[in-house]
Amino acid sequence: MADDDYDYLFKIVIIGDSGTGKSCLLSRFTNDEFSLESKSTIGVEFATKTMDISEHKIKAQIWDTSGQERYRAITGAYYRGAVGALLVYDITRQSSFENVDHWLKELREHADNNITLMLVGNKSDLADTGRQVSIEQAKEYASESEMLFFETSALNASNVEVAFKTVFERVYDTVPKTVAQDSEAGAGPGQNTIRLKPPTAAEDARSEKSQGGGGCC
């Protein structure tokens, strides 16, 4: 598929404490890969994946950053243009769940008011032996904060695909959309067929190119 062969481009961000598995979730969703030897993300990285929603091609651009304090300087660029966000905690670390409050506050300060939010409890494969955050507790918090909710496991891929797709489907249903004036002039998909009113993530990526980094969760 060509890079411009899509109808919508949606940028979502993954936030949460370091070590909750954000990068592993990203790798599992975009490449169906998981590494037990993964390292903390340094700075910012993003990956893309194309999917079908309704009759349209959706290009998902998913941004991942470190949850460590020293990388907060990139906050503004990280959130700019995002139409969805995954707030990730580790179900075996109560502190990572309690810190969701901080991440949600930061998100609301920097992101659009209409952003689609999902609370994600990762590492559900450890539920029987190390769970510290109950499903009921997380569901209640998500409901009060007007967020979608899933428990996932990047290790065994449980609920990873459905969680991401649910976010993108909700974004698709709610984001403002317009048909371009010259959509009937033979323009290819992803160019003039349909445009989003918010700035596209591709534009953000070009403007923030110097912020790039690498690594995993």
Image (cartoon, rainbow, N blue to C red):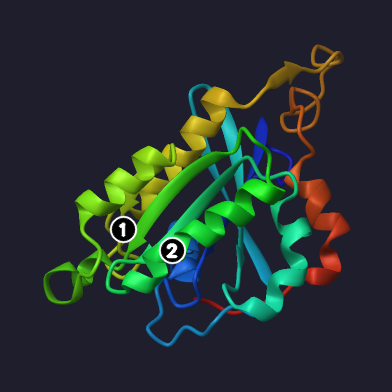
Q: Residue at x 50, y 43 (%)?
A: 117
Residue 25 image label = 2
Question: Quarter of the image containing the N terminus?
Answer: top right
Question: Which amino acid type is marked by label 1?
Answer: Thr
Q: Residue furthest bottom?
A: 37
Residue 152 image label = 1
Q: At numbered mark 1, what does the secondary structure look like: helix, strand or loop?
A: loop
Could you classify mark 1 by the number of other residues whose Cα lies within 10 Å: few (under 14), some (14-19), or many (20 or more)?
many
Q: At numbered mark 2, what does the secondary structure look like: helix, strand or loop?
A: helix
Question: Which amino acid type is marked by label 2?
Answer: Leu
- Tell me if 161 is positioned left or right of 104 in this view: left
Q: Residue at x 70, y 71 (%)?
A: 72
Give the spatial CA distance, label 2 vs label 1.
8 Å
- Residue 163, position in %: x, y? 38, 47
- Residue 187, position in %: x, y? 82, 24
Compared to residue 133, the image places residue 159 above or below, namely above
- Residue 184, position in %: x, y? 80, 11
Q: 15 or 21, which is in the foreground?
A: 15
Q: 188 or 135, which is in the foreground?
A: 135
- Tell me if 153 is positioned left or right of 211 in this view: left
Any part of residue 57 in sight? yes
